[in-house]
Amino acid sequence: MSEVAVEGRKGFYASFQYVTLIGGQLLALLVVVVLQHTMEDAALREWGWRIPFALGAVLAVVALWLRRQLDETSQQETRALKEAGSLKGLWRNRRAFIMVLGFTAAGSLCFYTFTTYMQKYLVNTAGMHANVASGIMTAALFVFMLIQPLIGALSDKIGRRTSMLCFGSLAAIFTVPILSALQNVSSPYAAFGLVMCALLIVSFYTSISGILKAEMFPAQVRALGVGLSYAVANAIFGGSAEYVALSLKSIGMETAFFWYVTLMAVVAFLVSLMLHRKGKGMRL
């Protein structure tokens, strides 16, 4: 989307990457909500939990078929370059690779903390009923999905660097206060408001995640550079968010996780300071 989008609207169109990603999370959560309301707890624990995985397997086949119907966006002359998709070409762009690792680590950690892990946090820490927590997160994810194009369009006006600086600074300042407030929240409406504040901050990253990384690599190593850096950072930091949070909670150090997320947000802010200012990035 970022490569074929109209100049000056790339942030807006690229934001739909996370619209679809959040939409997938929302769909999964809706399946859970439906199962919670239509099945007995015993049946859900015995065999009902397999239903979402079965649906996911079917949708994965559909996604594979759709991908096979798409045309490649890169030009033939680009793919013919000697360093196209090579580690040597990636090494020449190692600064961009390390930078993408930096803000993807923070961005994916914050994203999974306030989306995937948050439902468990509301139940295990705030003491809310599972159905209430599911309802809060369903509403929050729906709004989160809708604001992606708005923040993406804003990045076309203020620049990707400014958007990332907003994400890094706001996440560093407000992560601990928001998570601390959620520990003792009793009102579902207050919980929804706090979660939305966090997701609004995360939107400064998610809405431009695709276009930001693509703009940092030349076409001949763009797929490798973006794909590898994203996969590594997302697996290590985003994928481990829930495990780290629950592990620290189990030993009575839950607040240490708050500061861990904050520290990574500071890293994202520092890395973002090295980004090109608006109008000086790589043209796709």
Image (cartoon, rainbow, N blue to C red):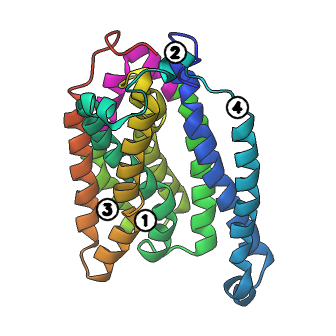
Q: Which is in the foreground here, disc 2 or disc 4?
A: 2
Q: Residue at horizontal 30%, vertical 33%?
A: 88
Image marks 4 and 1: residues in contact by CB distance under 8 Å: no
Q: Secondary structure at mark 2?
A: helix
- How far is the residue under mark 3 from the one under mark 2? 53 Å
Image marks 3 and 2: residues in contact by CB distance under 8 Å: no
Q: Which is in the foreground here, disc 4 or disc 3?
A: 4
Image marks 4 and 3: residues in contact by CB distance under 8 Å: no
Tag 1: residue type? Val
Residue 13 at what x, y percent from top left? Answer: 58, 23
Answer left or right for 5 relative to 51.
left
Tag 3: residue type? Ser
Main SS of the magenta part reads helix
Reply above or below: 170 against 213: below
Q: Secondary structure at mark 4?
A: loop
Reply above or below: 156 against 195: above
Which sits in the foreground, 103 or 31?
Answer: 103
> Which badge, 2 or 1, comes first in the chain's sequence?
2
Provide the residue designation for mark 1.
185
Label annotation for residue 77: 2
- How far is the residue under mark 3 from the one under mark 1? 9 Å
Residue 228 at what x, y percent from top left? Answer: 40, 44
Magenta-colored span: 151-168
